[in-house]
Image (tube, rainbow, N blue to C red):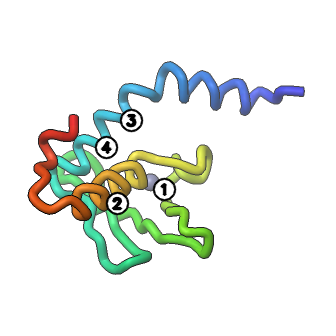
């Protein structure tokens, strides 16, 4: 049986949230909000005039990233984690410009 929350989840993922998510990911990277602190810890710094919280992103024992934002609590994924993954990908490729990503 499908519960209401599951139906909402799919709605968000496939329609409403799909685009805003990408633009958020782009924003975190554009303004350099993602800061890698160590191999298993990073932060998404607040963007002036947009939000005020610093989000903590940590890597768990199974090597998957987890964020302490509300969205991650609901969907087990969020724009902060997606932005971090992209940033790490680019850090691994010397000379790659972030702007070429989108
Ligand atoms: Zn997050």
* Labelled pair 4, 3 in contact (Cβ < 8 Å): yes
Mark 1 vs mark 2, foreground winner is 1
Residue 15 shown left or right of residue 24 in the figure = right
SS label for mark 2: loop
Q: Residue at x 72, y 32 (%)?
A: 5
Q: In which quadrant will I find the N terminus?
A: top right
The Cα atoms of the two marked residues, 2 and 3, are separated by 17 Å
Q: CA distance from mark 1 to mark 2?
A: 9 Å
> Does residue 8 appear to the left or right of 63 in the view shown?
right
Q: Which is more toward the observer, 84 or 11?
A: 84
Q: Position of residue 31 (x, y in %)?
A: 15, 51
Q: Position of residue 21 (x, y in %)?
A: 39, 35
Q: Earlier in the sequence, mark 2 or mark 3?
A: 3
Assign the C terminus to one quadrant of the image. Answer: top left
- According to the picture, the residue beneath numbered tag 3 turns out to be 21
Q: Can you tell which of label 3 and label 1 is closer to the viewer? A: 3
Q: Position of residue 60 (x, y in %)?
A: 57, 72
Label 3 packing within 10 angstroms: few (<14), some (14-19), many (20+): some
Instruction: List the residue tagged with mark 1.
Output: 69
Mark 3–mark 1 Cα distance, whole angstroms, equals 14 Å
- Residue behind label 1 places its C-beta within 8 angstroms of ligand 1: yes
Q: Is residue 28 above or below residue 33?
A: above
Mark nearer the viewer, 4 or 2: 4
Residue 9 image position (x, y, % from top left):
64, 31
Q: Which mark is residue 25?
A: 4
Mark 1 → mark 4, Cα distance in angstroms = 14 Å
- Which label sits on residue 53? 2
């Amino acid at each position: 049986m499908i519960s209401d929350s599951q139906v909402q989840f799919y709605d968000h993922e496939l329609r409403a949230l799909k685009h805003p998510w990408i633009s958020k990911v782009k924003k975190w990277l554009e303004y350099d909000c993602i800061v890698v602190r160590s191999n298993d810890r990073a932060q998404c710094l607040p963007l002036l005039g947009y939000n005020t919280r610093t989000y903590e992103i940590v890597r768990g024992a199974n090597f998957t990233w987890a964020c302490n934002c509300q969205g991650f609590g609901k969907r087990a994924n969020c724009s902060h984690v997606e932005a971090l993954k992209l940033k790490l990908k680019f850090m691994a490729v010397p000379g790659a410009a972030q702007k070429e990503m989108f």
